[in-house]
Image (cartoon, rainbow, N blue to C red):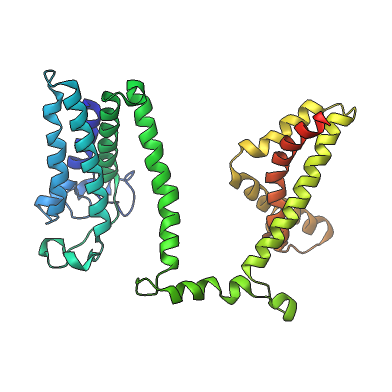
Amino acid sequence: MLLWLAVGAAGFLVVPWYAVQDSLLGVGWIKDFADKDNAPALLQALTHGRMWLLPLGLLLVAFTPLLRPTVVRRSRANGLIALGATGFLYLALQGFAIGPRGVVFESLGALPALAMGQYGIGLGATLTATAFAMLFSAGLAERGFFKGDAFVAGSVVAVTLLVTTFTFFPVMKTLVQAVQDNDGALSVTAFLNRLFTEKVWGLSCITGNTRCGVAWNTLILAILCAILSTGLGLAFALIVTRTAFPYKKFLRILSVLPIITPPFVIGLGLILLFGRAGLINQFLEWAFHVQPTRWIYGLQGVLLAQIFAFTPIAFLVLIGVVERV
């Protein structure tokens, strides 16, 4: 508790609350420490009028009575859960409710204190949000969740927040914008226009000289990838189980590598090899005067990358089937 309260206090009192324009690694923000762009939350509230940040500091102070050894464990756990959840949710809500141009919701426009607006969160806000989340997880452990292990509770809360922030939130944001018009209002017409646009379902590749829609291109890519990946996976499975191939162990190890490597590695490797400035294209130009092209960025390039990615999965599935036939 002391550790995370210290982290939260540092985020609220010491480091810039909002994102610094250049970088925290520089020293320019230190000389302008009290400026509205670099000030911590306390100075932002008292000096620059962003009073909505003060409740976060008061919530951090409210944790201190829970540090007394005489506090009943259940009461401490309930207090940690309540204050941690309140602090984190309030920090998130004020960030969404007040943007660079002031309040986002018209119902809050009558409050003059919210008129100045705020920018994206920086190190200070991140440290304070982390402190609230970890104190909340400590309360869960105190209540007996996760077998009372504070490390496991903190890990689960951290992973949940990271996945929600960087996966579910962007996806939901995109899905919501799909049913909004240019003014941000819900519109079925705008959704239908986006869904049935020529760019998605067009068949101009058959009736004209332009490309087909994204949906048909995706379907073609999926069918080709399924056929080729399954065929190659079956071929490798037959080699390992039905032949005297001397490097079977090496082939098994090689088949796992595309699975454990990050997905972007395959794409980046193909671009560095076959891109316009790629190694092979540069060699062909130097040796045979073959002009480099951008062929890798089309259907064939994406198909090649997906075959590299999905053939090992097909191999691992099919080798068990082949071994039992």
Residue reaching furthest bottom?
208
Q: Residue at x 30, y 23 (%)?
A: 144
- What residue do we see at 12% from left, 67% from top? 110
Q: Residue at (61%, 36%) from the top-left corner?
A: 260
Residue furthest out toward the right = 244
Asked if residue 247 is positioned above or below residue 217 in the image, the reply reads: above
- Give the vertical position of 198 relative to 282 (above or below): below
Q: Which one is in front, 116 or 63?
A: 63
In x, y percent, where is residue 88?
25, 43
Say whether residue 81 is left or right of residue 320. left
Tell me residue 46's x, y (percent).
9, 51
Which residue occupies 25% across, 29% down? 139
Q: Quadrant of residue 104?
A: bottom left
Q: Nearer the viewer, residue 194 or 247?
A: 194
Q: Quadrant of the C terminus?
A: top right
Please, which residue is most extreme toward the front here? 325
- Could you tell whether 252 is left or right of 26 in the image? right
Q: Quadrant of the N terminus?
A: top left
Up-down: is 32 above or below 68?
A: below
Out of 72 and 106, give the one closest to the viewer. Answer: 72
Q: Does residue 298 appear in the picture of this structure?
A: no
